[in-house]
Amino acid sequence: CWLWSEHHLSLWRSGEIRPSSMRYHLIGPAMMADASPCLVGRAESRRRFLGIDDTGATAWRTVAVFDLNPVNKEGRKVLQLGPLPITEEFVEAFYQQLLRLLEALPDIRLLVKTKRQDHPHRLKPPAQKRLVDPSSEWVRTGRVINLAPDTNPYIPIGAADLTIGVPFTSPVLAGLHFGRPGLFHDPLGTALRHHYHALDAIISHGYDDLEKKVRYWLYDCAPEAAQAFLDRPETQRFLGPHPGMDPAEEFGKALWGESFTVSPATGGLSHAR
């Protein structure tokens, strides 16, 4: 069984079904995509994978945004689901607060990566559509870049100075694994009670807390302080066994042994037979 981190392993072991013969391997981010955009520096990742060259331009701070498409009431009936923590109101407030953040911080640029295309049971909220409207000032001036839902999620992560996602979704943890600060944003206080208080420094509740923590991680936090946060045992247990490593290589080594490698040039996989 291949798992992300010590935290995921502890959750797995706490379950009632644990075959005694099962072996566990921790491999880091278990998002099925090519992680090479995160294996280079942020500016290089933006240039190589998004075609953005910031040389001599405004000193933009790039923020990658990840959401979840909420299941509406009709969808919950069809899928026979009960109440869900991520509601239409939650995601609408999430995007409304991002719009306020754009107003408050004129040098940030958002890379918006939605989870799915519109679907009758998972409609995007009005504020999200307003944010990525091609005719909007944000999009026309390059302050909002709308990425297709099927975009490799490691592309915005690799390009980001900060990631923002809804609690407690994987792109923020993947960003931390690759040394990119991140925030889990809870716009309505839905997640005030949770089990992850070791990560309170990267969990924001409501707009004021969001702006405060974005300002800290983007502007005020010294690189040494950011690294110290990542190096804490309390943070490390949520990351992969070797932060910064390509999870494909960790996966390959778990399958085929230490001879397995990932070519840094092509992303190709190989192992000695």
Image (cartoon, helix red, strand yellow):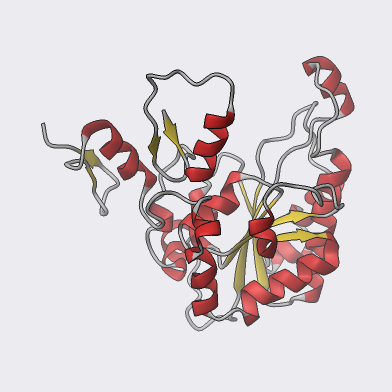
Residue at point 41%, 56% (across, down): 243
Left or right: 261 with respect to 220? left
Outermost residue, left side = 273
How far across and how far down the image is residue 160, in percent? 55, 63
How far across and how far down the image is residue 232, in percent? 51, 64
Nearest the viewer among 167 and 48 is: 167
Left or right: 169 with respect to 71? left
Please say if 211 is above or below 175. below
Left or right: 169 with respect to 36? right
Quadrant in the picture for residue 213: bottom right
**The C terminus is located in which quarter?**
top left
Quadrant in the picture for residue 216: bottom right
Q: How many marks?
A: 0
Nearest the viewer among 63 and 223 is: 223
**The N terminus is located in which quarter?**
top left
Residue 102 appears in the figure: no
Please say if 29 is above or below 18. below
Residue at point 66%, 36% (across, down): 116
How far across and how far down the image is residue 151, in percent? 54, 44
Please say if 252 is above or below 15. below
Residue at point 45%, 18% (across, down): 19
Residue at point 75%, 47% (across, down): 194
How far across and how far down the image is residue 129, in percent? 79, 48
Please say if 206 is above or below 128. below
Residue 51 appears in the figure: yes
